[in-house]
Amino acid sequence: MIDNLAAYHFAAIDDPDAVADRLRALAEAGGLRGTVLVAPEGINLFLAGSAEAIDALVAALRADPRFAALQVKRSASAAVPFARLKVKVKPEIISFRRPEAMPLAAPARAPDVAPEALARWIAQGHDDAGRRLVLLDTRNREEVAHGTFAGALTLPIDNFTELPDALAPHRDGLRDATVVSFCTGGIRCEKAALWMRADGMDNVLQLDGGILGYFERVGGVGYDGRCFVFDDRVALDPALRPLHDGAEAA
């Protein structure tokens, strides 16, 4: 079986080209394929290969004090769902272009809710304080089409940068709710929650670990469908089984 790694970590990187070169070398040494993004704000990884190679790369990263707290999500597939290895240096690990949503510049990380707590809130229909619950999907319409939380607020966006304008008509209706932003693995919902709180919405939380973390820890409670992923598997069900199991590229 092939091991699939999804991971990101916000950390100040003053040498992104050097970090990218090191990650490329580690991935190539283990025969890993996938996508590695490096930016001054951190790293974002989607890689696949042998479990031993994934373990070695994660261990090497965590040996760097900047990435010691790196959290990872892993799933299995029958074949490698990436055609090749791509390593890129970008201005952001996910483009949002909102300075107030830069985690390293914010006074603190946006408050989060654990998957276990969110599953409980969904089951009871409100948070533990009795406030109504609104789940805000920060992904684009193509991803949402594969699945989302039942009753979630979804927005007609194609790019993450469009979220602030698309959310504007809904803001007044969210004032009395506990709003939980969610996304695939955590990056977009973390940035979105930071931006919303900086913009006056102090009732916003982020889902810790995103949908993939939720699937891993509590399964599909309250979720309809699958979660789109950025490789040849297309989407994963709540048991982290792929819609398509990938195929080795020729």
Image (spheres, rainbow, N blue to C red):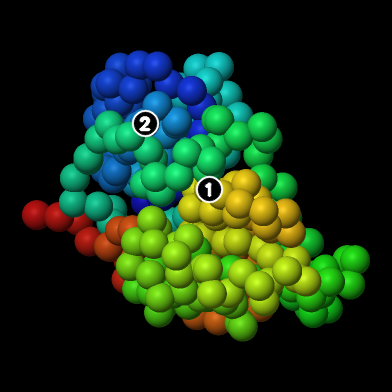
Mark carried by residue 39? 2
Quadrant containing the C terminus is bottom left
Give the vertical position of 250 relative to 242 (above or below). Answer: above
Q: Please name the residue that numbered disc 1 is placed on.
A: 191
> Can residue 213 be seen by looking at this rendering?
no
- What residue do we see at 33% from left, 67% from top? 158
On the image, the x and y values in percent for residue 61 come to 47, 24
The amino acid type, in three-letter code, at marker 2 is: Ala
Which residue is situated farthest in the right direction here?
A: 129
Query: Earlier along the polypeptide chain: callout 2 or callout 1?
Result: 2
On the image, the x and y values in percent for residue 234 come to 33, 68
Find numbered disc 1 in the image and state the secondary structure of the residue it sits on: helix
Find numbered disc 2 in the image and state the secondary structure of the residue it sits on: strand
Quadrant containing the N terminus is bottom left
Give the vertical position of 161 relative to 226 (above or below). Answer: above
Left or right, 27 with respect to 106, comes to left
Would you call the spot at circle 1 few (<14 residues within 10 Å), some (14-19), or many (20 or more)?
A: many
- What residue do we see at 28% from left, 21% from top? 17
- What residue do we see at 52% from left, 43% from top? 101
The amino acid type, in three-letter code, at marker 1 is: Lys
Mark carried by residue 247? none
- What residue do we see at 83% from left, 78% from top? 124
